[in-house]
Amino acid sequence: MSDGDATRQYATFFVGGSYYGIEVQQVQEVLYEQRTTPVPLTSADVSGLINLRGQIVTAIDLRRRLGIRSRNPSDHEYVVVIRTPTGPLSLVVDSIGDVVTVDPNTIEMPPATLRGDARSLVLGVHLLDRQILQVLNVDRLLALVAA
């Protein structure tokens, strides 16, 4: 087995004080404070649209999607642009963490305390030295956005 098969790398970020990750291969780029154009009559968790070098990309506010209270208007926000089969999708998060490498065999089921969409969006958790990394299920997130 090669080293690439023995570990997984996650791009990490924070939302509402919780630590989340998405597999690095799914992340296109990370941006700081992108201007979002609101779109009427969309789902409450859609922040709007961003212009990514001429490409219009939907922005999902993960705080809203995960049922976490809204951020203060003065708080900074970051955008994690992920690759999807239908094109890029952006996730609005509170702050960016590091890329972490974990053993895929250490993943555990999501805790029973997660409720609603948060529970369905978390594939599992990794217990790290200082934090619990919640791995997001990008396929499930896409399904909710398309619904």
Image (cartoon, rainbow, N blue to C red):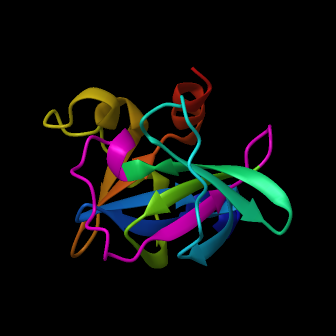
Q: Is 132 situated above or below 101?
A: above
Question: Nearest the camera: 23 or 73?
Answer: 73
In the rendered image, which quarter contains the N terminus? bottom right
The answer to whether residue 100 is visible is yes
Q: Residue at x 32, y 42 (%)?
A: 66
Q: Residue furthest right?
A: 54
* Residue 85 magenta-highlighted: yes
Height in image: 32 above or below 110? Answer: below
Task: Look at 24% across and 74% down and name the residue there.
Answer: 129
Could you say where residue 61 lies in the image, as x and y percent from the top left?
44, 51
Quadrant in which the C terminus appears:
top right
Magenta-drawn stretch, dominant element (helix, strand or loop): loop
Question: Does the magenta segment cover residue 40?
Answer: no
* Residue interval drawn in magenta: 63-87
Residue at 38% x, 40% y is: 65
Residue lying at the far left of the rendered structure:
113
Residue 99, position in %: x, y?
Answer: 52, 75
